Image (tube, grey):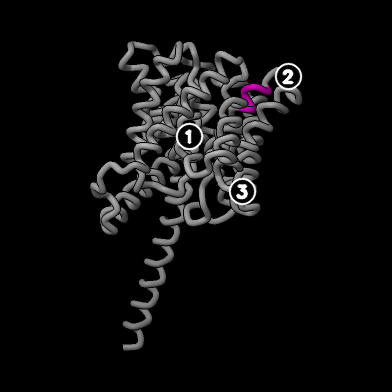
């Protein structure tokens, strides 16, 4: 899903003639594919990908995803709170009341962020939540620590539910240039703030994301009346990148770059596959994987350069 999203965003940026962004997307795609392959091979080597059976914890995780999806959708659509505020509330409440299951519940909340134009009622959301819950359990051992993993799981559920029920995915226009500048600014702010709250202040990723997303959902429409809603959505997307741990994204400087990547993908993915809850998380997921991939590629190049220098030095001394 991440590769498809980033590849199509590259095509859109190239077709729009924004060659600088298209070039950035090529580099991001290379890093994304490299890190996906590296992570998969590492998990195989460490024997993390194996059948451990379906445990009671898995069952409650699955159930939490479904409950989170229904709760968020109901708050968003039926109580008219909107997807950003609803997901933030569900995340914060879950982190406070059921911290053990806050992560799967928040994953479900991303499913519940789906547009009512795409998934018209709770029956559709239930199907999407069941699919996402199954994927959550199946993917429990891989890509942990990367912000956005939960959203990718949620988007898989939402898109599959839409396709199975014959719903057409939505489209939106690319935002205006002046709006794009604000989108990129708030993308960086949202990602970095979430990481700080989550890791520096030790409140955890769900609480960190929930606080920043909820604040953005309440304040940005007031600060920017015309585009505040869209900016709040971007901040929410960026918070998912900020849920990463330091083993994946070493510091806030790298997170700022991940936020920038997420902002660019957010802008150029507007014309396709809209409406499904979790697309924002998928955007964040690919961005932080790409950052990790770039770090590993640079590390590999340095190691090979060092080895070459040592080899040349040994040959010279002999």
Whether residue 316 is visible, yes or no, is: yes
Which residue position is annotated with label 2? 225
- Residue at figure coordinates x 48%, y 48% from the top left: 291
Q: Which residue is mark 1?
A: 105
Q: Is residue 94 left or right of residue 232?
A: left
Query: Residue 242 at what x, y percent from top left?
Result: 56, 44
**Residue at x 70% of width, y 26% of height:** 218
Marks 1 and 3 in Cβ contact (< 8 Å): no
- The crowding category of the residue bearing disc 2, from other C-alpha atoms within 10 Å (few below 14, some 14 to 19, many at least 20), is few
Image location of residue 91, percent across then percent down: 56, 35
Please name the predominant secondary structure of the magenta segment in the image. helix
**Distance of mark 1 from mark 2, alpha carbons?**
31 Å
154 or 75: which is nearer to us? 75
- Looking at the rendered structure, the secondary structure element under dot 2 is loop
Residue 304 picture location, percent across and down: 37, 66
Residue at image coords 64%, 37%: 211
The image quadrant where one finds the N terminus is top left
Q: Is residue 106 magenta?
A: no
Query: Can you give x and y, in whole percent of width and height, for residue 241 in the image?
Result: 53, 41
């Amino acid at each position: 899903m991440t590769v498809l999203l980033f590849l199509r965003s590259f095509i859109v940026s190239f077709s729009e003639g924004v060659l600088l962004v298209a070039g950035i997307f090529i580099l991001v795609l290379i890093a994304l594919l490299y890190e996906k392959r590296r992570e998969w091979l590492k998990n195989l080597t460490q024997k993390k990908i194996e059948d451990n059976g379906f445990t009671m914890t898995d069952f409650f995780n699955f159930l939490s995803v479904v409950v989170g999806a229904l709760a968020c959708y109901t708050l968003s659509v039926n109580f008219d709170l909107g997807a950003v505020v609803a997901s933030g509330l569900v995340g914060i409440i879950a982190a406070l009341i059921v911290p053990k299951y806050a992560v799967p519940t928040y994953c479900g909340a991303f499913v519940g962020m789906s547009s009512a134009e795409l998934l018209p009622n709770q029956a559709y959301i239930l199907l999407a939540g069941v699919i996402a819950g199954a994927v959550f359990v199946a993917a429990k051992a891989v890509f942990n620590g990367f912000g956005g993993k939960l959203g990718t799981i949620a988007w898989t559920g939402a898109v599959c539910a839409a396709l199975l029920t014959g719903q057409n995915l939505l489209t939106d226009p690319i935002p205006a240039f002046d709006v794009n500048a604000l989108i990129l600014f708030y993308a960086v702010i949202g990602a970095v703030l979430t990481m700080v709250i989550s890791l520096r202040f030790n409140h955890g990723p769900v609480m960190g994301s929930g606080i920043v997303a909820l604040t953005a959902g309440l304040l940005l429409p007031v600060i920017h009346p015309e585009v505040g809603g869209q900016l709040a959505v971007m901040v929410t997307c960026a918070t998912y990148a900020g849920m990463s741990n330091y083993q994946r994204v070493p510091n806030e400087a790298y997170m700022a770059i991940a936020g920038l990547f997420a902002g660019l993908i957010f802008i150029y993915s507007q014309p396709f596959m809209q409406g499904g809850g979790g697309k924002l998380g998928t955007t964040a997921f690919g961005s932080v994987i790409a950052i990790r991939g770039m770090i590993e590629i640079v590390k590999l190049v340095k190691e090979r350069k060092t080895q070459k220098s040592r080899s040349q030095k040994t040959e010279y001394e002999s």
